[in-house]
């Protein structure tokens, strides 16, 4: 950077950006901004921007102004208190601060030798979090055979687990010869879409879908055992089972202890995708979620879902780090170095799909320190209370049916399927809140995941009033869907 | 965020962080900080940190202080002007500002509907960059069949290309049945390690290594044709060729036009990995690098290497977006939405491995606008001049041999291999600069990639004096390797 000219405009722009962001957060907290703008047609942002980049540089303050004029109004505000779709994406001032510092330091942490403190900080914070979640000691770096790594997503964690499992199941043969279509992945139809995607990306094609226990969305262990036996009989090699702690559809929790026992007996890798629900185990009262996790070979949570940490921040642990690193290590001469050759250090490039990586640990370190375990637990308990409140309101209302309610997720429907679809459609046109539409057991449902860092009890009541209004005969009145034009905010 | 208590400490911490970062950059620019601390033993950072996370939250200013006390001294400073290892990781104030704003907005852009402006901005900036690089029009979103996407790394871009190529080569069969070990990837031994890794991760096992033209590090098109024919004769299905524009070893450029012609004739996907050298095509005088790229099915550059953009920011284009999205789309009910169902929008989740993603485009938009094309070109030309200067100094020095010099890369050796190894070892112990050791044609070499945003002519002369001193009889004197203790800076 030609620091002479660039420093003062940068300092001023950062000051301005933080003021704009604080104003934005306040507007979200006060619900002066809509969650989304349902009427916005595809192409509006494209049309608002020039077709070619500028030849000459432009001042940072003009770019900030354009951000708020052109980009912000076209976003869906995931941090809005009434953003209840999918699962939340966490955030906090500490997380945002860490992104600033990480970007400013500009370090690439692919190997220990390219940023020793970046690597070691990641070892420390993943060990911190493993202990805070009550995970077994063999997931810690200090165990010697295990350890944690920060991935960009639960998707990447699953793919890494699949690659490691294939390596182990084939005794390294896969690494040279490929999958040959014989290796199998097992999941339920409730597993996140990223699991089926990982099986495809890893060259396995379609994965084997294990039935769920009747009347639940939980994997049936007996059915798993049958599928494994059937595949073996047909010449297949069961490589990996992916169980879920907190499914996307209904926050169901697979029976880890039973599944883990089968995987141990059968010599099959068990990966546990606890992307959403996993962080709840920070609270002793929710630690049961991980009962049986001791038999897992790998386990992953999205700190960026429910731990006040901005996306991306998935934390993955394994008890068998050799399978990861042996599967993925490729060492051309320009990456060879003394520290790696001795085996005394962790080279995170071999724990993930990409070669390069930013310094990922600073953000989690900032968040865990700024909130402390108490703060993180309080945030989870708050959301769980808010979800319980919404569930109560739904359950008490004539014409509404609570389908399921666990942790921060509330799934409900109306009397009839056409009514549910009709209300879902009506709600989708309301900028003041955002729910997901989905299906459970083939029936349409509405799905509210409570977890915005700005969520309050007042939001829940307002959301509930809005939902009832859309369900009322004749649909919503206009009065409560008014929101400020966000161009006016800060 | 309980905005009441968190806003003012956050604002103050951001102000403090930007002051610390500016101080850090100045210390790097003035070379008051070392690039690295070669003597630091593995475990030093682990030992300096507590084994458990705090129960209570801590103030942000204490965390910042600890960052500079504990983490920064243990980093390798990739932004240091004398960081000459691997390839550079770019940065600029505009890029850092964008990371702050992106983190603060906290939007997840997996589908158009989850952040319309995030998606459309990415369509616009990737079209901007394609045009600025002189790429063919079929790589633009406006073409209808093509378009650009921001990945986290060149590794991920290659893997996505492999997945799309397998889909196309198998007419979708791969998606259901897996790879069955018959599909083949072709590369030279000079391709980045991520190419071999992608072949493994995608279930292909070892890739086919195509010989290079004698005396060069460039793929031999005739040998490629022979390998394709041999594999077909043996029942294999050639799926993808990965060519490189700017290899990691010597910045060699594969003959794209010849390779592309063969790929077209043979119906094989051509991916071009231009991670390092690609951005040079912003300058008309380097546009020859991409001669023949019109026949490629996908092409990727790392904006985070040579475009003043912080990591991660890989930009990948394809002329066949349907193969990407058909290969990777998995649509459970909770992700279904009207906009996606109409096919009128881009859903970037189907252009990448992970489901979730941050708003990736803001950073590239800020960088392209803040510098303008002129500024980005000037930065590349500056680095090319600096490399030419170093190459001249090397070539003129008795006992040194220039092995290769292209763009910002200078590769050299000493009279004998033992001498090269000895000087490499001596330089590795010097905190004032960082080069890579590698091998070319089996002989050890030293490798300097010039591209730190803080690089000046004075740095080049200082680096050269240091190298000469290490090569002098008796090794370096102590006087010039002194650097401040970085704990004292800011």
Image (tube, coloured by chain):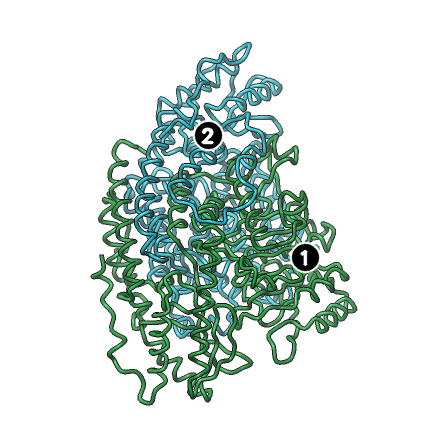
Chain colours: A green, B cyan
- Image position of A430 with respect to B59: above or below: below
Q: Position of residue A262 (x, y in %)?
A: 74, 64
Secondary structure at numbered mark 1? helix
Q: Which mark is residue A294?
A: 1
Q: Which mark is residue B84?
A: 2
Closer to the camera: disc 2 or disc 1? 1
Q: Position of residue B435 (x, y in %)?
A: 50, 28
Q: How far apart are the alpha carbons under marks 2 and 1?
A: 45 Å
What residue lies at 72% left-to-right and 51% top-to-bottom?
A: A173
Q: Is residue A280 visible?
A: yes
Q: Which mark is residue B177?
A: none
Q: Residues within 10 Å of mark 2 (few under 14, many from 20)?
A: many
Q: Position of residue B298 (x, y in %)?
A: 47, 53
What residue lies at 38% left-to-right and 38% top-to-bottom?
A: B286
In the displayed structure, does residue B115 sit left or right of residue B471? left
Q: Residues within 10 Å of mark 1 (few under 14, many from 20)?
A: some
- Image position of B233 with respect to A30: above or below: above
Which is nearer the eye, A89 or A429? A89
């Amino acid at each position: 950077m030609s620091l002479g000219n660039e420093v003062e405009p940068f300092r001023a722009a950062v000051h301005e950006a933080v003021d704009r962001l604080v104003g934005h957060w306040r507007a979200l907290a006060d619900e002066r901004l809509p969650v989304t703008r349902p009427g916005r047609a595809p192409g509006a942002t494209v049309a608002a921007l020039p077709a070619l980049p500028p030849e000459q540089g432009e001042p940072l303050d003009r770019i900030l102004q354009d951000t708020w004029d052109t980009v912000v109004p076209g976003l869906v505000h995931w941090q809005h208190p009434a953003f209840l779709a999918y699962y939340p994406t966490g955030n906090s001032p500490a997380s945002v601060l860490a992104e600033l510092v990480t970007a400013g330091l500009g370090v690439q942490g692919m190997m220990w030798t390219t940023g020793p403190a970046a690597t070691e900080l990641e070892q420390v914070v993943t060990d911190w979090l493993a202990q805070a979640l009550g995970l077994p000691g063999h997931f810690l770096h200090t165990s010697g055979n295990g350890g944690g790594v920060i991935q960009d997503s639960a998707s990447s964690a699953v793919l890494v687990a699949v690659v490691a499992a294939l390596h182990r199941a084939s005794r390294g043969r896969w690494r040279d010869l490929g999958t040959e279509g014989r290796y199998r992945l097992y999941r339920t139809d409730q597993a996140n879409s990223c699991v089926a995607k990982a099986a495809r990306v890893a060259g396995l094609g379609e994965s084997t879908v294990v039935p769920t226990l009747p009347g639940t969305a939980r994997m049936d262990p007996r059915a798993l055992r049958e599928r494994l036996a059937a595949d073996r009989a047909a010449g297949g090699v069961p490589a990996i089972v992916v169980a879920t702690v907190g499914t996307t559809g209904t926050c169901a929790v697979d029976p880890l202890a039973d599944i883990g026992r089968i995987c141990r007996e059968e010599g099959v890798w068990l990966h546990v995708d606890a992307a959403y629900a996993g962080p709840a185990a920070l609270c002793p009262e929710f630690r049961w979620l991980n009962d049986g996790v001791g038999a897992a070979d790998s386990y992953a949570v999205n700190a960026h879902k429910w731990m006040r940490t901005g996306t991306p921040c998935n934390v993955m642990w394994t008890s068998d780090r050799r399978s990861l690193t042996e599967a993925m290590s490729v060492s051309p001469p320009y990456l060879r170095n003394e520290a790696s050759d001795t085996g005394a250090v962790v080279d995170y490039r071999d724990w993930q799909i990409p070669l390069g990586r930013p310094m990922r640990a600073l953000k989690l370190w900032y968040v865990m320190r700024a909130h402390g375990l108490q703060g993180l637990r309080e945030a989870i308990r708050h959301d769980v209370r808010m979800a319980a409140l919404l569930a109560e309101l739904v359950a008490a209302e004539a014409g509404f049916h609570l389908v399921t309610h666990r942790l921060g997720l509330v799934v409900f429907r109306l009397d009839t399927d056409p009514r549910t679809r009709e209300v879902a459609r009506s709600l989708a046109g309301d900028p003041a809140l955002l729910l997901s539409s989905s299906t459970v057991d083939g029936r349409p449902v509405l799905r509210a995941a409570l977890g915005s860092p700005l969520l309050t009890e007042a939001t829940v009541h307002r959301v509930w009033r809005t939902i009832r209004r859309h369900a009322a005969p004749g649909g919503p009145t206009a009065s409560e869907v008014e929101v400020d034009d966000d161009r006016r905010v800060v």
